[in-house]
Amino acid sequence: MKKIGIIGAGVSGLTLACLLKKNTNYDVSIFEKDDFKIKNINGIQISPNALRILNELNFSSFDQKKLCKITGVSFFDHYSNLKIAKMSFEYLSDEPYITLNRSDLINFLINKFSLEDHIIEKEVLEIHEKSILFKDKKKQYFDILVIADGIFSNLRQKKIKPLYSGYSAFRGVFIDEKQSNQIDLWMGKNFHFVKYPINQNKNYSFTLVKKIPYIKNILNYDYEIKNLKENNKFYFPNLDNIVFDDLNIKMWPIYKLNKIYYGHKDAFFIGDSAHGFIPSRAQGAAQAIEDSYALYNLIKKMIFCLQNFLK
Ligand SMILES: Cc1cc2nc3c(=O)[nH]c(=O)nc-3n(C[C@H](O)[C@H](O)[C@H](O)COP(=O)(O)OP(=O)(O)OC[C@H]3O[C@@H](n4cnc5c(N)ncnc54)[C@H](O)[C@@H]3O)c2cc1C
């Protein structure tokens, strides 16, 4: 039986692991440096293409109260607070555009396919051809290596670098009195603010993207931020019924890769480690799912060639 090593238990690594576990008899191991059970409460957006792939993983059994089928996007001018445009998603009613909590999707994938036994909590230091060197200096060999370790991957060739974009995202959640199925987006100079529901319990996720030129050296997600509201009242649109809890707000510096990188001879890169996606495009998770599906289709046919993956 061929051995597949996946580095990273994020959306891309787990989706690939589920597809392989459901449809093949490869021996799959997933290596994750952080505690994958920690709950992250922010929302992610899943496009119809990605949802079609999740449906192949029995996503129709996912608790429908824990997701939101988006009916459209409203665009507002931040200065006047006036609605300037509206995009309807009604035409997607059969295959909707959905939003949900990232951790709920992660937990669904892990539980539905009993992946807990396949996830090994170990940090990968280096890869050499098809072997992995761990932080504890142990080494393990695989037939296929898949790197799904996010935008800050240390396993790419050195010339591929994450560069700070000059913008940071502030993310958090809040409760509204009204349940909506809409994404609302406020646009201003050098920033935007987006809010959307993430379930049927009036929980919303928001992301404020704004220019913060002085952050140069942070290489991580989720920095605690306590005083965003005091210092940045200006950026929050005037919304009724909403209380933003400062303690729930995390800062997320936005990086992008200087080059798209899908791998080299012995290793495939998928998800954010291959391309990174700035949050204002809201497609990081959806693209990660599509990458996993493309690679799974090659592995299923025993095609282990990067050129085919690039097509
Ligand atoms: C903690 C966290 C919270 C996030 N929250 C949101 C959110 O609220 N909204 C949103 O739109 N997107 C969020 N994202 C990003 C979003 O999930 C990704 O953009 C997208 O889903 C692509 O996923 P990915 O699997 O390619 O990468 P990621 O989601 O970044 O997953 C990469 C995984 O690899 C692990 N890893 C990294 N290096 C190593 C190593 N050397 N050895 C072993 N494991 C390693 C990381 O711990 C991580 O679990 C979050 C990502 C993380 C890690």
Image (cartoon, rainbow, N blue to C red):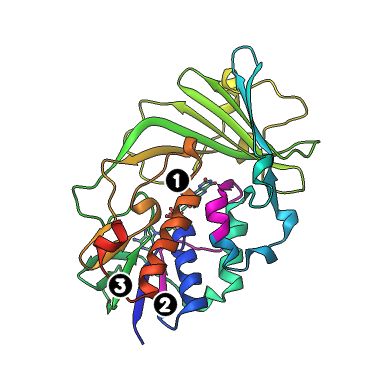
The residue shown at (41%, 37%) is 254
The residue shown at (26%, 40%) is 258
Helix, strand or loop for disc 1 = loop
Q: Hey, what amino acid is under mark 1?
A: Tyr
* Depicted 191 relative to depicted 250: above or below: above
Which residue is nearer to you in this view: 195 or 25?
A: 25
Q: Hey, what amino acid is under mark 3?
A: Ile
Which residue is nearer to you in this view: 95 or 129?
A: 95
Residue behind mark 1: 221
Ligand 1 image position (quadrant): bottom left
Residue behind mark 3: 303
Mark 1 close to ligand 1, CB under 8 Å: yes
Give the alpha-carbon distance from disc 2 to disc 3, as whole Å: 17 Å
Which residue is nearer to you in this view: 134 or 85?
A: 85
Q: Which numbered disc covers residue 28?
A: 2
| Mark in front: 2 vs 1 | 2
The residue shown at (59%, 56%) is 103
Look at the image and give the residue range highlighted in magenta: 28-52
| Mark in front: 3 vs 1 | 3
Residue 38 visible in rendering: no
Was residue 42 drawn as part of the magenta stretch in this picture? yes
Q: Earlier in the sequence, mark 3 or mark 1?
A: 1
In what quadrant of the picture does the N terminus appear?
bottom left
Looking at the picture, how far across and down is residue 158, in whole percent? 19, 51
Residue 34 visible in rendering: yes
Q: Hey, what amino acid is under mark 2?
A: Val
Q: Earlier in the sequence, mark 2 or mark 3?
A: 2
In what quadrant of the picture does the C terminus appear?
bottom left
* Depicted 234 relative to depicted 170: above or below: above
* Depicted 19 relative to depicted 179: above or below: below
Which residue is nearer to you in this view: 156 or 296?
A: 296
